[in-house]
Image (cartoon, rainbow, N blue to C red):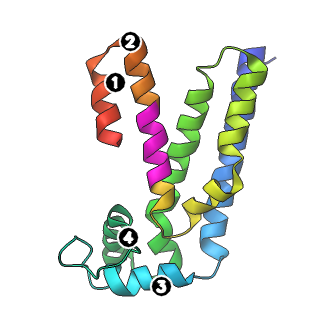
Amino acid sequence: MLGKKNLETALALGLILALIVYIVVRAIVIPITYDEAATFFHYIHLGKFWPGEAHWDANNHILNSMLSWFCYKAFGNTEFVLRLPNVVFGPLYLFIAYKFSLLVFDKKLRWALFLALAGCHFVIEFFSVSRGYGMSIALLITSLYFGYRWMKSSAAWHIILCILFL
């Protein structure tokens, strides 16, 4: 029989897995958006995403364009392949949302925080399109998590990870 702690972990893991499946299915089935098409034709297809050589507009999310370009070169130009870098950042976001919630001792508040982070629909949807917003949110929350851990422990590797993810 599962203990209370194990049950809570199992429920959180179940929710995380369900959301990962949702992100993957959504990345496969939704049609390409105008912004994704523009990003593909202006940056990914040409391989020009670095400032100075890229088309000048706000649509270029450099990390997204670069990682999508690598996927495009390696696996072709399907919508899912172009969205793959964002799909990969979804589990990172969900895992760190869970780790962040574990920092809260009160069970109700812990679940409120986890459900607020994992259940924020518009944030979760960013992980299934080829845009830079999902990646930036995942990297930001990861940086905040390691920044908090560094403040509590003063471990050098925590601040290094905080800066790296930032």
The relative height of residue 50 versus residue 33 in the rendered view (above or below) is above
Q: What residue range appears in magenta? A: 136-144
**Neighbourhood count class around disc 1 (C-alpha, 10 Å): few under 14, some 14–19, many 20 upward:** many
- Image point 38% across, 70% down: which residue? 68
| Residue type (three-letter) at the residue carrying disc 1 | His
Q: Name the residue under label 3.
A: 37
Quadrant including the C terminus: top left
Question: Which is more N-terminal, label 4 or label 1?
Answer: 4
| Residue type (three-letter) at the residue carrying disc 2 | Ser
Asked if labels 3 and 1 touch by Cβ distance under 8 angstroms, the answer is no
- Which element type, helix, strand or loop, lies under badge 3? helix
Question: Which is more N-terminal, label 2 or label 4?
Answer: 4
Location of residue 159 in the rendering, given as x and y in whole percent from the top left corner: 30, 26
**Neighbourhood count class around disc 2 (C-alpha, 10 Å): few under 14, some 14–19, many 20 upward:** few
Question: Residue 119 in magenta?
Answer: no
Location of residue 157 in the rendering, given as x and y in whole percent from the top left corner: 28, 23
Front position among marks 1 and 4: 1
| Residue type (three-letter) at the residue carrying disc 3 | Ala
Residue in the foreground of this view, choosing between 156 and 12: 156
Q: Mark 1 points at which residue?
A: 158
Front position among marks 4 and 2: 2
Q: Name the residue under label 2.
A: 153
Question: Which is more N-terminal, label 3 or label 4?
Answer: 3
The span from disc 2 to disc 1 (Cα, nearest Å) is 8 Å
